[in-house]
Amino acid sequence: MMLRQLTRRTILGAASLLALAPMLAFAAPSSEEASAFVNDFGGKLVAVMNSNTTLDKKRDALLPLLRQNVDVQGIGRYCLGRFWRQATPEQQKIYLELFEDVLLNAVTARMGEYENISFRLVDNVASPAGQKVTLQISRPNHPSVMMTAVIDGEPPKVVDLYGEGASMRMTQRSDYTAYLTRHGYKVQALIDALKHQLGRQ
Amino acid sequence: MACKGSTMQHHKGRKTALFTLVGCLTFSSLAGCTAKPPKDPDELADYKAANDKFEPFNRKMFNINMWVYHKALRPVGRFWQKHVPQPIRTSVATLNETWREPAVFFSDVGAGRPRRAGDAFMRFLLNMTTAGFYDVAKHLGYKQHETDPGMVLALWGVKSGPYLFLPGLGPSSFRDAAGYALGQGLTPINYVPSGYGLISFNWGYNILGTFNTFADNTDQLDQLEHQSLDPYAFMRSAWQQQRQSQIDALKADHRATTPDWY
């Protein structure tokens, strides 16, 4: 009986180690790396937002920055949850393209309100999801806002954002899951809704 | 006096009867509005994660809430935001926070967090020198924080129970709805008796507070509606996570009660 348990435990242990192996390639960045990354990326974002240019030009400047520094594909997959496996390769491709635009829209939607902003790092802790770096964002005549970015992977990228204690990707996933559940579990229905949301229909 | 007392008792009795009626109606509605747990394992995992057994009822309540928001609260909130100067809006917000401080104080005591309780006590004391209109305490190092009886119940190990959305109250749970009722009992402004001049202050406090809250939140609510496919689910998830993070922060707050210079 004991031998059986031991064997089962060993197998389970080995299995979990094997499961972790691919994660080595995605080693979490160190605290210093994460801080340096956030300072660099944040500085570039703030420079775009504070620049005296049109909203369209700011949007154009933001897109390559987001592609380079945010794990859009990973977040997109996470948000689709179990429906990712159900989607056809074509649907996956379209969904990820739409998701990138949704993300960009979310960033740029209220960009006009975020001018003359500055930020400083206030905390940096390790978590299973990656290194959590908390920033304090200040704007003139407004109370400061706290935001936490989760940094992971090699090269480091933003894999999640937390505002008021809520994870952006988890909230988005709940939104999509609820929508799909109420629309016959059809990924195409979600794709159509995202197109509609982006004003493409 | 006796007459006044009996009128108040009558008023209280009517209030209790009304609450009992609303409670009974809510629970009888809830009983008929339970979502069946799905059989598919993946679906079941999502169902459990949402913790929303009464989703059909909650969605109806959410729709009523949003209808009222669009028809009345949003226009008023927008008007308030546009025409009332920021310093006045800040004062109204501070007034609301200050009058809530006793409930925060008792919650901090219940949670066994003396440093937080001290902060809440000092905030009430200092801000009441301006009748609660100006946040003097903030400038003296006593920043505003939120602790409510729902968080204390969580700290005591009371389970949240299923998610609950009630019009006016918003996202909640059985535990937090009970906490809200307790919080109301701990808020001194709610004890202003009818027939006294202060009742108009009480009404003003509540109405202005509501306008102010909506004025401050219309942008967020509009954004929520535009940027989510299912605003109900989006709000539910965000609220559940935020609530858990507030409880975690309260649990982790073991700051010493001695001053920093000690």
Image (cartoon, coloured by chain):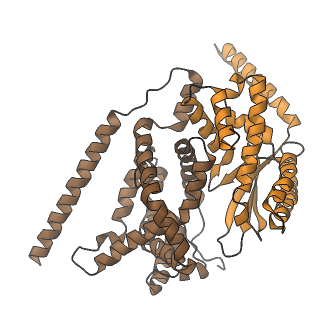
Chain colours: A orange, B brown
- The residue located at (81%, 55%) in the rendering is A59
Compared across the picture, whether B24 is left or right of A159 comes to: left
Return the residue found at the far left. Answer: B3
Return the residue found at the far front. Answer: A201
Location of residue A193 with respect to B251 vertically, above or below: above
Compared across the picture, whether A89 is left or right of B66 comes to: right
Q: Position of residue B149 (x, y in %)?
A: 43, 58
Q: Is any atom of residue A155 visible in this view? A: yes
Q: Position of residue B253 (x, y in %)?
A: 59, 61
Can you tell which quarter of the image residue B208 is in? bottom left
Q: Position of residue A55 (x, y in %)?
A: 78, 60
Q: Is any atom of residue B118 visible in this view? A: no
Quadrant of the rendering where the N terminus of chain B is positioned: bottom left
Q: Nearest the camera: A26 or B38? A: B38
Location of residue A119 with respect to B140 vertically, above or below: above
Compared across the picture, whether B158 is left or right of B191 comes to: right
- The residue located at (50%, 71%) in the rendering is B80
Can you tell which quarter of the image residue A187 is in? top right
- The residue located at (66%, 80%) in the rendering is B261
Give the total of numbered labels: 0
Q: Position of residue B23 (x, y in %)?
A: 28, 47
